[in-house]
Amino acid sequence: MVQKEIQNVLTISGKNVPEAKQFTTHGNMGRALWFVALAALLTSGFYFWHFDNIFYPDSVSYIAPAKNLLTSHVFNGPDGKPETFRTPGYPLIMVPFLWAHLDLKSVVVFQHLLRILIILGTTVFTFSFTKNRRLALITAVILTIDFPFLEAAHSILTEMLFTAILATVYWILWNKANQPRSSSASFLTAGMLAGMSALVRPIGLFFFLPALVFIALFVPRLKLRASLMFLAGFLCFPLAWAAHNQHTVGSFTVSTVSAFNALEYRAAGSLAAERPGDFRANFQKAQTELEDESCLEMQRTYSRLCSQVTLVEKSGYYSRLARTIILQHPLGYLKAAARGASVMMLDGGPITLSGLAGTNWPTGMRVLMIYTLPVLILALYGLVTTWRVNRTFFVLAMLVIGYFVIISAGPEAYGRFRVPFLPIYAILAATGLDSIITRFLPH
């Protein structure tokens, strides 16, 4: 009976997966999960013990609104004015810890626990649809030793919470794509979680697009109803927050950070990529030029100093100027995006390596490519394998990874930017390695 159920799971688009004879049953995975949990706990514990710094330049922009929420029940920034640059998702998570008078390291402990749960959840998820114990354990190993994943857990930044929420959305979408009947409530829940994630990191604001494509392709019945339920759930939180900003600052926007990023990174990167010489030096120079140009124009427009122009007022001008520059320099934009994407995928966490071995950033980057480059190659090979044996997961992986790579690729990108799709990326890399082991090593 068990073997029959396993074979049903492995029958994809009418084809039987040839590797089925190598797969094991659920009973053998239970004991292995204890070792996965222990390994994840030990690596988190070692990182927590070895690295004291949990603050980054952006951390204060989350801490100040959290403190204001606790003391005055308003979402204001460090300057005491309504906060539009950051969204309330992550500061709200910090409020209970601050209310209990706990050190902010308690937030980091919570994030390390999220990391452990994501590793365990991804391992169980992998085994649940492949029944391949070795593949699931390889996935766990990749997640456990990933430095950017540890860095995300150990910093007062949004990536870990964002990833935990989205990993739940991935699971719901996958689960409903493999069921002949799916309740509307499931898609509403998935949409609400995805919309909630956009208030943790605004980069998720357009995640409904790949989600709707996946639903349209793989939900067996009532695709339109499922899509509408997901979209309705997704829009709840972003629209509510945009309405809040309209009421408080007169701008119907979720966050002004996108306008800032468009000018400071995308537009500046487009200019820098088309100039001869070192990209980083050109990039910093282009940023200064754009800041000066923006300041002069806003002083003429608003008849006051740049420091007196609000973020909302700046965001409109930043967006228009960035759009003009990118359209004038499309090749430069593509070059900068390609550079950012490569750094995102190949950055293995040189900051962590520096703390452990004392290496500088360039040396650490090169050393860690010994790990990150093979993982990227294995993930690409894993994509080829999943195309042959599991089209549903192939499309889910392509949509999720493609979305985050495209929307995140810029001069500011680095390894921690791949954390939101790391669970799926790790499964692909593990699939690639397992396929190689199955093909070339004797059994």
Image (cartoon, rainbow, N blue to C red):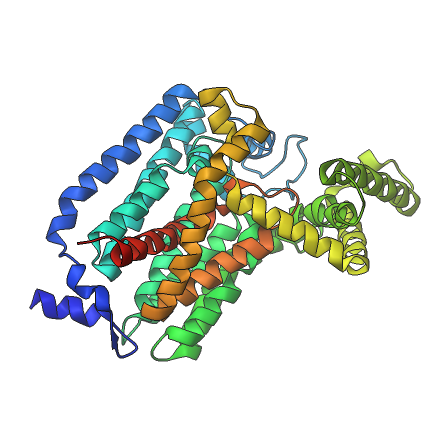
Snapshot quadrant of residue 173 = bottom left
List the single residue furthest toward the left.
1
> Which residue is painted at 63% across and 34% down in the image?
77
Snapshot quadrant of residue 81 = top right
Left or right placement of residue 146 versus residue 261 in this view: left
Image location of residue 405, percent across then percent down: 55, 54
Left or right placement of residue 279 versus residue 169 in this view: right
Count of numbered circles on the image: 0
Left or right placement of residue 176 versus residue 278 in this view: left
Q: Using the image as rendered, state which of residue 275 and residue 253 is in the foreground.
A: 275
Q: Is residue 368 above or below residue 439?
A: above
Q: Quadrant of the N terminus?
A: bottom left
> Which residue is painted at 72% across and 54% down in the image?
333
Residue 435 visible to an observer of this rendering: yes
Image location of residue 24, percent across then percent down: 14, 56
Left or right placement of residue 336 versus residue 100 in this view: right
Image location of residue 191, percent across then percent down: 44, 62
Q: Using the image as rendered, state which of residue 123 and residue 378 is in the foreground.
A: 378
Image location of residue 283, percent across then percent down: 75, 40
Q: Is residue 78 above or below residue 228?
A: above
Residue 66 visible to an observer of this rendering: no
Q: Quadrant of the C terminus?
A: bottom left
> Which residue is painted at 48% across and 35% down in the image?
368
